[in-house]
Image: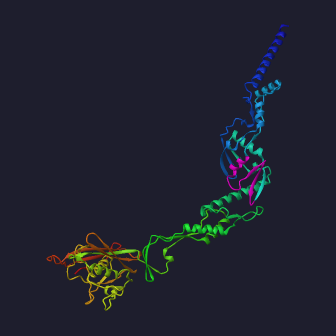
């Protein structure tokens, strides 16, 4: 009898303890934990406590991108929040206790989520003028000049995102996961392909043509028959290309040339010009639209300066020698008018061309008439020998053959400048004839170019440059063996020097001058 009473006492005591615990749990759930979810409440996939700043990697339509959950506004529905918050807190103490006991076993509760689907498609597809628009479980996609409506499987989309949050942080979404109707998969995929290609075309046209190119092309055929692209505004396209042409085109530059009679003398080569061919560019755009593959390259071309010249061009871009002299501006306390006569003599040979193998006679070139005036209307006077001397020195320096020349029989002090001995000069006299005759030994024409320069040292400096084609061989001229033969004279120098001519390092000619 006593052992049975003890059993009853134990059961009674246990009941009192359980009831007391249940009462304490009931009171705590409705006071201390009011407005809070109980710690042991679990939801499907254990995703209740996910961090809304977390990123997941989303793979869709061949593109990988990371999306922040906060940007999608993915969260529990209000009803699910209330369900979780109230679970284990029913006003009925027996239900509260039952639910509390269920939590001990770790019971999962089914909940629902919601998200911003418009924002989802913004991130999924990308920004464009045909951006999908979400509305009440449907997405509207502008495709080939019209709106196409697709029904979404919202629950499947959300469940995949929630699953990714709990497991791999990565989710693959196919169109079959997004659309409720499998028949719309091909259509939606087609529209995305069209849109991707449209954006590629717009970007390439803008890259090549700038602003104003957005509406130049459109789909040529409907979605039921495939599609191609066409130019729908040729007038605008031609306008943009002409504007591009004005910005791009550049004439050849950096060269030096001069029109002489019916010839053009080229003294410094031009950098090539460039231009845009509008007609060919339109053809290239049309061809590119046929495949939309690779880069779009407009029809740019470069062209040489010679291509647009109206006359024959003679290449004188290579200087092969320069003759230099100087003449005193004041002589014996007076202006030296010989300076002006020297300039006249130089001007008479300026831009004179000597053909290959041709001989040049200074006197014949002047064509002096009975009145003493040259064919160009210039009067020859004292001091012209400075011109012949400068030309003679140019011939020496450039390797021309000197068929005839004669030194002065008197001392000309200004010719001291330039060489070790004052023996490099050439006299001129019309009658009796004292001439300077040269021969062009190159395979290309040569031209004489003159220049003058006054300096503060009291002299005017004269230059004759001998120029020819850039194609001529490089000859090296060496003046050596300067020898004076009348050492007893304090002024007039009699003597000679040797001109050695080399080609590719080999001596090809050696001549003695000055006797």
Residue 135 placement, left or right of 378: right
Q: Extreme bottom residue here?
A: 370
Q: Position of residue 373 (x, y in %)?
A: 32, 88
Residue 375 placement, left or right of 152: left
Placement of the N terminus among the 4 image quadrants: top right
Q: Position of residue 326 (x, y in %)?
A: 27, 75
Above or below: residue 430 compared with residue 190: below
Magenta span of residues: 117-145
Q: Position of residue 141 (x, y in %)?
A: 74, 55
- Residue 128 in the magenta stretch? The answer is yes
Give the total of numbered labels.
0
Residue 385 placement, left or right of 137: left
Q: Position of residue 128 (x, y in %)?
A: 68, 55
The image quadrant that residue 428 belongs to is bottom left
The image quadrant that residue 77 belongs to is top right
Q: Extreme right residue here?
A: 1
Q: Residue at x 78, y 30 (%)?
A: 87
**Colour logic:** rainbow
Above or below: residue 140 compared with residue 450: above
In this rendered view, identify the residue nearer to me: 224 or 277: 277
Placement of the C terminus among the 4 image quadrants: bottom left
Instruction: Report if residue 191 is visible in the image.
Output: yes
Q: Residue at x 84, y 10 (%)?
A: 4
Q: Extreme top residue here?
A: 2
Instruction: Report if residue 387 is visible in the image.
Output: no
Q: Extreme front residue here?
A: 334
- Residue 252 in the magenta stretch? The answer is no
In this rendered view, identify the residue nearer to me: 303 or 82: 82
């Amino acid at each position: 009898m006593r052992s049975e009473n003890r059993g009853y006492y134990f059961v009674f005591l246990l009941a009192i303890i359980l009831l007391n615990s249940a009462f304490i749990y009931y009171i705590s759930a409705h006071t201390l934990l009011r407005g809070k979810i109980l710690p042991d409440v679990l939801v499907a996939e254990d995703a209740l406590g996910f961090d809304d700043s977390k990123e997941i990697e989303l793979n869709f339509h061949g593109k990988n991108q990371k999306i922040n959950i906060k940007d999608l506004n993915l969260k529990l529905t209000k009803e699910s929040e209330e369900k979780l918050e109230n679970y284990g807190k029913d006003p009925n103490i027996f239900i509260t206790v039952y639910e509390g006991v269920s939590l001990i076993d770790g019971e999962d509760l089914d909940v629902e989520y919601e998200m911003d689907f418009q924002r989802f498609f913004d991130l999924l597809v990308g920004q464009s003028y045909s951006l999908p628009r979400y509305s009440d479980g449907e997405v509207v996609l502008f495709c080939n000049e019209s709106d196409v409506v697709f029904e979404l499987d919202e629950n499947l989309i959300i469940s995949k995102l929630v699953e990714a949050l709990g497991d791999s942080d990565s989710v693959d979404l196919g169109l079959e996961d997004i659309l409720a109707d499998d028949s719309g998969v091909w259509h939606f995929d087609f529209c995305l392909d069209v849109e991707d290609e449209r954006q590629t075309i717009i970007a390439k046209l803008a890259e090549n043509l700038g602003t104003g190119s957005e509406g130049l092309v459109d789909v040529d055929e409907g979605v039921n028959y495939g599609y191609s692209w066409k130019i729908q505004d040729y007038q605008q396209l031609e306008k943009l290309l002409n504007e591009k042409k004005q910005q791009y085109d550049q004439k050849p530059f950096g060269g030096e040339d001069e029109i002489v009679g019916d010839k053009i003398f080229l003294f410094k080569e031009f950098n090539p010009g460039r231009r845009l061919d509008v007609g060919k560019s339109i053809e290239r755009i049309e061809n590119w639209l046929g495949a939309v593959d690779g880069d779009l390259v407009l029809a740019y071309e470069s062209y040489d300066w010679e291509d647009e010249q109206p006359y024959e061009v003679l290449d004188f871009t290579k200087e092969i020698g320069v003759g230099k002299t100087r003449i005193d501006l004041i002589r014996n306390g007076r202006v030296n008018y010989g300076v002006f006569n020297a300039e006249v003599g130089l001007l008479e040979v300026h831009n004179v061309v000597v053909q290959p193998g041709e001989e040049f006679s200074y006197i014949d070139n002047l064509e002096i008439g009975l009145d003493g005036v040259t064919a160009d209307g210039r009067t020859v006077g004292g001091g012209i020998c400075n011109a012949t001397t400068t030309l003679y020195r140019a011939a020496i320096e450039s390797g021309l053959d000197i068929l005839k020349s004669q030194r002065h029989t008197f001392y000309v002090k200004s010719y001291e400048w330039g060489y070790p001995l004052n023996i490099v000069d050439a006299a001129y006299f019309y009658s009796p004839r004292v001439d300077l005759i040269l021969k062009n030994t190159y395979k290309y024409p040569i031209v004489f170019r003159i220049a003058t320069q006054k300096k503060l040292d009291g002299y005017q400096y004269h230059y004759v440059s001998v120029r020819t084609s850039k194609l001529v061989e490089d000859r090296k001229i060496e003046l050596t063996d300067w020898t004076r033969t009348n050492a007893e004279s304090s002024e007039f120098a009699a003597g000679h020097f040797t001109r050695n001519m080399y080609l590719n390092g080999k001596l090809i000619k050696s001549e003695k001058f000055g006797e």
